[in-house]
Amino acid sequence: VQLVESGGGLVQAGGSLRLSCAASGSIGSHNAMGWFRLVRGKARELVAAITSGGSTGYADSVKGRFAISRDNAENTLYLQMSSLKPDDTAMYYCAAYQYAIWSRHPDYWGQGTQVTVSS
């Protein structure tokens, strides 16, 4: 299994970014997937997740601002981030699960992409 993130970068507060995660190997439409973020010194946070059936879940801190989606034909996961805040600055990781539903403990991880939001 390989998960490759892209789309991170530097953006001003209030701006938008879209993260992408290209999945290969045994990960497909039957697997749940998600996005986590990590800030040094803080606990890893599950930002958003999506089941194989398309049901989504979000951390309270990003509800209404972030949207997770997937393109099963392209085997790609997305995270559209809007109204970004400096507190959203973190390394963002794509994650995948062996099964159709998500949890706080994924089975596979990407290498991460840095998102930095300036004030």
Image: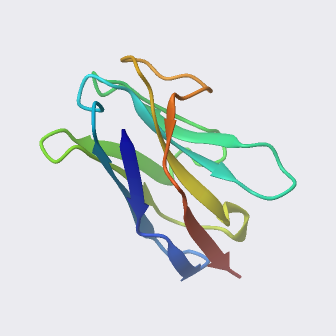
Residue 79 seen in the figure: no
Residue at position x 67%, y 66% in the image: 89
Q: Position of residue 37 (x, y in %)?
A: 63, 51
Residue at position x 39%, y 56% in the image: 4
Residue 11 seen in the figure: yes
Residue at position x 51%, y 28% in the image: 107
Q: Is residue 49 left or right of residue 53?
A: right
Q: Position of residue 33 (x, y in %)?
A: 41, 34
Query: Which one is in front, 109 or 84?
Result: 109
Query: Which one is in front, 59 or 91?
Result: 91
Residue at position x 83%, y 50% in the image: 42
94 vs 81: above or below: above
Seen as rendered, the residue at the extreme left is 73
Q: Quadrant of the N terminus?
A: top left
Q: Position of residue 35 (x, y in %)?
A: 51, 44
Image quadrant assignment for residue 26? top left
Q: Position of residue 60 (x, y in %)?
A: 64, 39
80 vs 108: above or below: below
Q: Quadrant of the C terminus?
A: bottom right
118 vs 115: above or below: below
**Colour convention of the picture:** rainbow
Q: Is residue 70 left or right of residue 80?
A: left
Count of numbered circles on the image: 0
Q: Is residue 111 left or right of residue 5?
A: right
